Image (tube, rainbow, N blue to C red):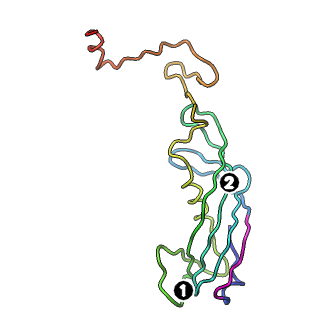
Amino acid sequence: MKVNILQLKNAPGESLPFHIQDTMEKLNYDGQVIDFEGPVEVRGEVTNEKGRFILKGVAGATIATGCVNCLELFHMRLEGKLDEVYVPSGGMSGDAVEGEPVFFDGDAINIKPEVINSLLMELPMRLVCSKDCRGLCPQCGSNLNVKQCNCEREHIDPRLAVLKKLK
């Protein structure tokens, strides 16, 4: 996933819009398998600012992953913002770069790592299929979203069972 900046290298102050669609391989993120469904789409603009290349844009993708409650596969749309400063590896002319620049070589900028990071930042803390997901029965393993099981629900912590006798 590369943005060709050959036209911008000798044109300070100029901008170049871009639109890229590319497939991504599965990722293992914090124990969850993230499968990109279809291409990842990135739209944005690169600006040559005194030898620094400022990239601003939006990355979008549909992912498939398993729900942490019921283990069923579900789909989710992600959109992440890109706001990066790219600097040629050989150094740059002009002012110092603020923040953390990304170094590159040649006439194209590889934006794939930043695209992946921007999409992963949009993932919720818990990947659940819906906010109302009831998960699996802890005793029989039935998916409680599909059918209600007949298992006994009252589970008392054995350390607290003594307190029940006080009733």
Three-letter residue code for mark 2: Ala
Q: Residues within 10 Å of mark 1 (few under 14, many from 20)?
A: few
Question: Which image quadrant: the N terminus?
Answer: bottom right
Q: Mark 1 points at which residue?
A: 90
- The image quarter in which residue 162 lies: top left
- The image quarter in which residue 6 lies: bottom right
Closer to the chain start, of discs 2 and 1, is 2
Q: Which mark is residue 61?
A: 2
Q: Residue 165 carries which label?
A: none
Q: In this view, does 88 lie to the left or right of 64?
A: left
Between residues 35 and 147, which one lies in front from this camera angle? 147
Residue depicted at 61% across the width and 25% down the height? 145
- The image position of residue 58, as x and y in percent, is 65, 63
Q: Residues within 10 Å of mark 2 (few under 14, many from 20)?
A: many
Tell me if residue 75 comes above or below residue 23 in the rendering. Answer: above
Question: Which image quadrant: the C terminus?
Answer: top left
Q: Give the range drawn in magenta.
A: 12-20
